[in-house]
Image (spheres, rainbow, N blue to C red):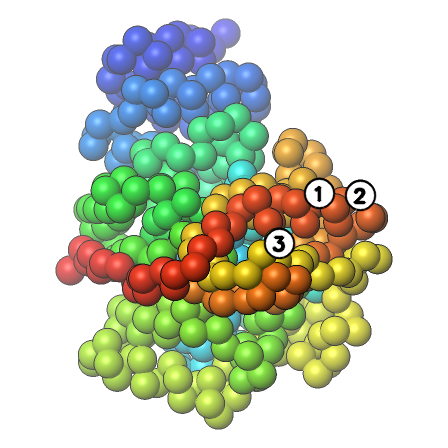
Amino acid sequence: MSAFLPQELIRKKRDGGVLSREEINSFVQGLVTGEVSESQASAFAMAVFFRGLDAVEQAALTQAMTNSGTVLDWASRGLTKGVVDKHSTGGVGDKVSLMLAPIVAACGAKVPMISGRGLGHTGGTLDKLNSIPGYNVSPGFERFAEVVEQAGCAIIGQTRDLAPADKRLYAIRDVTGTVESIHLITASILSKKLASGLHGLVMDVKVGNGAFMASHEEARKLAQNLVKVAGEAGLPTTAILTDMNQVLGTTVGNALEVQETVDYLKGVNREPRLHEVVIELAAYMLLHGGQVESVEEGREKAQQALDDHSALAHFAQMVTLLGGPQDFVERSEDYLEKAPVVRDVKAPKSGYIQAMDTRAIGVAVVALGGGRVRTEDDIDYAVGYSDVLPVGAHLKEGGTIATVHARNEADFEQASLALVSALTFGDKAPQDTPVCLEILSSD
């Protein structure tokens, strides 16, 4: 009989005790084998949420989850540098990864991106990719590596073998109100990235009312924690704090964000705030990968990859190699599912959009079916908002604020009311706020 009792470990952390490396290793192993039940994993996450982990506990949890499965070795494939990735802490309308990976790949780096599904009110990169017919988010390691080598990038979900302990805990955190724990976020992100065999990492740490870290102070704490733990693990990391007090880009919803990505890569539409975030993250990824010698050179190189459509070509190649349609970028609107009810939301009065409750908009998309309430819920990829006006936009009464994509009329009405309620209108234009707020580095 095993001497490990999960409930004793949970009780110890609940009461403020410090867990040993052996206890953490046993708990993580129990997550993989099933010896730790879902209710016990939930209780552990809640205990950590309230009590936290010290530096030694964080390092132990991160390492245990990293080593709970396979750790990739790119050097065995001749890649001794230039393997980089990016991770976002989660936002509303955050489709940055879909644009960023092919841009950086077009500039000569390799991007093996392990992404997650949505957490809470935020959309997940994996859910967005699942809206592309045939796209295989679980191709297996060998195929994953082949696509990275050929297309320069591959965005997939966590496989059964990569940080499996985190995969289980990640899904549980989503539905138990424990997403915001800085220490669990750090261990979750870094375990996947360390298992991916990276040479450099860039973190997009969201801050604002649509982020898990609403205050700049909390976001900075998370960024500092990520940079510190990653640096101690030997992974050079830069964290960029970016504003999430409004929707990023113009769409919220899985298929809608994929279409915005295609339009962005084609140059049809590049919303300025979204574009600034993408270019800044790309510049630091290229710097970590050794493709450029300065951030400014990185910005220029990333912009060139967009202008000459090489980034679009890498995106198209990645989609095709992972099972998507060969002509997806040419006919994306034909392939992406569309909602039966597509109607505009009208402004109740004239004025400027002075503020946006971004979290409420994310929650509204979940209510439409575009996110999960329970771990086993299916996603409706077609629903969401498009053509969302930014903070600072001026419109007249009856003008269009955004377009709702819904499954039925009742859902449209609910989503329309939710959007109007999430906006603050006024007679004066709000002060412009930067989208890239602060940069921290482990170097």
- Residue 410's disc is 2
Q: CA distance from mark 2 to mark 3?
A: 19 Å
**337 or 288: nearer the eye?**
337
**Visible in this render: residue 24?**
yes
Q: What residue do we see at 82% from left, 48% from top?
A: 409
- Where on the picture, by quarter, is residue 417? top right
Callout 2 touching callout 3 (CB < 8 Å): no
Up/down of 196 relative to 55, above or below = below
User: Which residue is disc 3 drawn over?
Assistant: 348
Under tag 2, what secondary structure? helix
Find the distance from the CA under tag 3 to the CA under tag 1: 15 Å
Of pointers 3 and 1, the one earlier in the residue sequence: 3
Q: Nearer the viewer, residue 219 or 181?
A: 219
Eye-nearest disc, 3 or 1: 3
Q: How packed is label 1: few (under 14 Cα within 10 Å), some, or many (20 or more)?
A: some
Q: Amino acid at mark 1?
A: Gln
In the drawing, does residue 108 fall left or right of residue 329? left
Q: Which residue is mark 1?
A: 414
Residue 406 position in % (x across, y down) = 76, 52
- Disc 2 residue type? Ala
Q: Are marks 3 and 1 in contact (CB under 8 Å)?
A: no
Q: Amino acid under label 3?
A: Pro
Q: Residues within 10 Å of mark 2 (few under 14, many from 20)?
A: few
Distance from Cα at disc 2 to Cα at disc 1 = 6 Å
- Name the N-terminal-most of marks 2 and 3: 3
Is there CB contact under 8 Å for labels 2 and 1? Answer: yes
Residue 212, x across and y down, in percent: 41, 41
* Residue at left offset 75%, top offset 60%: 343
Q: Residue at x 45, y 55 (%)?
A: 426
Q: Is residue 119 left or right of residue 305?
A: right
